[in-house]
Amino acid sequence: MPGSPAPPTGLRAGPISGAPEKSAGSTLDPGSGRDPVEDWRVIKGELAAYSSQLAGRPQIVAGSKAELPGTESRRRALEAFCEAEGLSFHAISSVTGLGLPGLLRDIAGILASHIWAPAAG
């Protein structure tokens, strides 16, 4: 639609399936060799460009592939960054299930503790 902001385009950022007006999700992959802190900054910028309201909503950061060897230093850097920024962080693994129960509890807690209105573009 002309005049509508473009959706986020990079790094797996965007509306969570089934709840596009309520939340934004992103996955950061410390196992990719990329800088996950810089990736978070890119995602945050894309969200802000798309919708300042959406970018201002509570955020949870999930660092994926936590089961892989050699990812510890990037995961620790991302975890320290999130702590300094006041962001909730979860190291997760889709393969082993590591961290998924805590991530789901955190998501449920945020969803239950806020009144949600549709985000305007």
Image: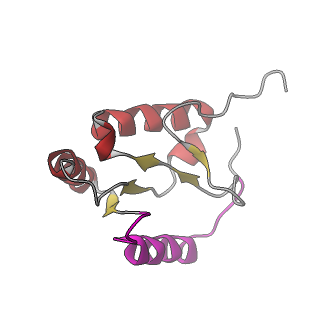
Q: Quadrant of the C terminus?
A: top right
Foreground pick, 97 / 115: 97
Q: Quadrant of residue 51?
A: top right
Q: Quick check: is 110 in the magenta stretch?
A: yes
Q: Quadrant of the N terminus?
A: top right
Q: Is residue 55 left or right of residue 2?
A: left
Report x, y in % for residue 31.
Answer: 30, 44
The residue located at (53%, 41%) in the rendering is 12
* Residue range highlighted in magenta: 94-118
The residue located at (37%, 70%) in the rendering is 96
Number of numbered discs on residues: 0
Residue farthest along the left direction in this orientation: 73
Q: Is residue 76 left or right of residue 22?
A: left
Foreground pick, 46 / 33: 33
Q: Is residue 76 left or right of residue 52?
A: left
Report x, y in % for residue 104.
Answer: 47, 74
The residue located at (54%, 42%) in the rendering is 13
Instruction: Identify whether 116 is placed above or below 34.
Output: below
The residue located at (62%, 55%) in the rendering is 16
Q: Is residue 102 left or right of residue 54?
A: left
Report x, y in % for residue 94.
Answer: 44, 63
Q: Quick check: is 1 in the magenta stretch?
A: no
Report x, y in % for residue 81.
Answer: 22, 47
Figure colour scheme = secondary structure
